Image (cartoon, rainbow, N blue to C red):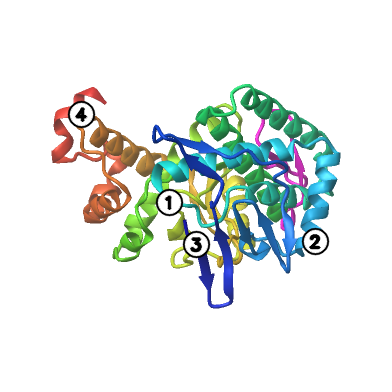
Amino acid sequence: MDDIIYRTKAGIKSSNTYNGLFSIGENGKYRLGIFFPLKPTTKASNLEFITGEVDPNILGIHSSADHVIKLWEKYEAMGFPLEDMAQSLYQLELTDFIRSWQAPPVTLLAETIVLICSIDKCKQIPGFDVRLSKDKRKLINLVEARNKDKHNLKKNRDVYEKIYTLHNEYATAFYINKILPITLTDDVDKPDFKVIDSGIMIDTKMRLVNDKPAYKDTFEMDLTNQAIFSLLMKEGFAPLQRTFDEQSTDIAMVNLSISSYGFMLSTGLIADSNFSHTMATASNMVKNKEKAIIFYTLPRGTINGIFSICFKRSIVDRIGGDLSRIDSQFYRLGSKKNFSEFAAYVNALKPESLNNVGSGGLHIRDLNKTDNDS
């Protein structure tokens, strides 16, 4: 098959190639090739993996390819199971590709590099050594479970999701620490970070769910700001309950970089690219006895800087909770709406429908027959 190449005005940024990595048997079943090691090499200024080539800059990494390779060797020597992690991502990427014939914009193997670069930026933050030791153990446990059943899609995906989750925590810590010095907590029952001066507790979550169709559909949609805010609240509602109610979080941060509605933030049309301003807004809410929620996207590809927006928790609970309920009811009725359909649905709601959420919730005619079940 031909290589899949992604270009920008600056030239080729990444390419995916699966030539020779799998074969088709006489029974029509696919068989993945086994390759070792999967550690990348340098090719000019790029990183070359067995599944594709990538410019580190498109990963949000502004270091040379040679430096990135040295980081791989450093963390591998520290006991991080980078090769096993890469093997898991290789299985997942090829399996997903064979099922859908769609490749990710950048090879999944590159996420190992993204993670260790994010980790390395945080080594001066208090609490780093203890947090790193515990996170290394989590990764080792996951890859050991996966290695016992290497073709198990769920176990491979568990590794993939943990890599994304840890990258989110370390990258977010790095950007917060530049504004408000923090310490990394080491208790799973506590939020991820504590602001040193104020004692404000901050927790971060990442939405890995992505049910949107091609971006061309979403870009053609003319959404009102109110609809966009509502969709963000719906997207961020689900992961917030435990962090506030069980972990005593003051500021919850929800990374929507690869979620259904994340692009609405990263376009910069409704979000603030001044992360310091967003953090100040959230901190002031906490000082006024309010819980704060920040929706944000991290730098990646052609997106430079963090785009973020802050809401009071009470607003997200009211609007996001009701839209989550409506979304689940559509699903129960057998008419689950994809990204574009649900976005258009929310855009068509009258402003007063959302303004009156607190007085009993949205009452949608199409859903009345399931209202008693909610």
Q: CA distance from mark 1 to mark 4?
A: 39 Å
Q: Can residue 140 be seen from the camera position used here?
A: yes
Q: Can residue 314 be seen from the camera position used here?
A: no
Q: Residues within 10 Å of mark 1 (few under 14, many from 20)?
A: few
Residue 305: x percent and y percent?
A: 61, 64
Q: CA distance from mark 2 to mark 3?
A: 30 Å
Q: Nearer the viewer, residue 29 or 192?
A: 29
Q: Residues within 10 Å of mark 3 (few under 14, many from 20)?
A: many
Residue 125: x percent and y percent?
A: 81, 47
- Magenta residue span: 177-200
Q: Nearer the viewer, residue 148 or 36?
A: 36
Q: Secondary structure at mark 1?
A: loop
Give the residue type that dot 3 points to: Ser
**Residue beneath the point at 44% across and 43% down:** 98
Which residue, given by chain and number where applicable, does mark 2 sit on? 66
Front position among marks 2 and 4? 2
Q: Residues within 10 Å of mark 4 (few under 14, many from 20)?
A: few
Which residue, given by chain and number where applicable, does mark 4 sit on? 371
Residue 202: x percent and y percent?
A: 64, 42
Mark 3 or mark 4: which comes first in sequence? 3
Q: Which mark is residue 102?
A: 1
Q: CA distance from mark 3 to mark 4?
A: 35 Å
Q: Which mark is residue 266?
A: 3
Mark 2 or mark 4: which comes first in sequence? 2
Image quadrant where one finds the C terminus: top left
